[in-house]
Amino acid sequence: MQSEDKETDVRGEIERLVRPLLHAFDESDLVRLAVDEEEFALEVVRRQRQRGEPAHGAAPPSAETDRAAGAPALPMDVVPADMVGVFHVSPPAAAAGDRVEESRELGYVEALGIRNPVRAPRAGTLAVVFVEDGDPVDYGQPLFGIEVAS
């Protein structure tokens, strides 16, 4: 029981510290926010908004990446969780750097015993895997980042 209480306390403390940072990030024109403390590190990246695109609203989360120094960043679509549940990898597991086809099942979110597939919205290169098999996920939480060539 004590370990569960300790975990809840740690999560609450992280949420208390991170929520204001994310709110400030969301309200600004920042593209990248990084915090690196002794026992805690956080990096949030967002793609630059397109002309006429609202700062808030229905647009799905997305980001830009600059993995190679000096290389131009490719647009990256972030694939979010459609519901709250537990994420599981679909075999064969896709790893960062793998080429994925449109509609490929990358994993699924299990909620109330129901398997809800997470599919690649388009073909591209899997740039980032934000979650691991068995991780709890929230609605809208980024699961994968897929780079798409223009």
Image: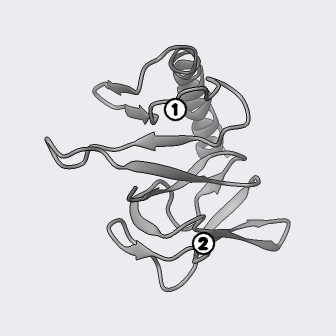
Query: How many numbered tags mark residues here?
Result: 2
What residue is drawn where x is 45% and y is 41%?
A: 63
Residue position for label 2: 107
Query: Residue 123, relative to residue 29: is it above or below?
Result: below
At mark 2, the secondary structure is strand
Give left or right: position of 84 versus 148: right
Name the spot of residue 24 as percent of width and height, x first.
53, 14
Crowd band around label 1 with a 10 angstrom C-alpha radius: few (<14), some (14–19), many (20+) = few
> Would you name the residue on which mark 1 appears?
50
* Residue situated in front as seen by the camera: 145 or 87: 145
Q: How is the image coloured?
A: one colour
Q: Amino acid at mark 2?
A: Gly
The x and y percentages for residue 61 are 58, 41
Residue at image coords 65%, 37%: 5
Image quadrant where one finds the C terminus: bottom left
**Disc 2 + disc 1, Cβ < 8 Å:** no
Between residues 27 and 124, which one lies in front from this camera angle?
Answer: 124
- What amino acid does circle 1 point to? Gln
Q: Position of residue 8 (x, y in %)?
A: 64, 36
| Residue 45: quarter of image | top left
Q: For mark 1, give the secondary structure.
A: loop
Q: Is residue 150 left or right of residue 9?
A: left
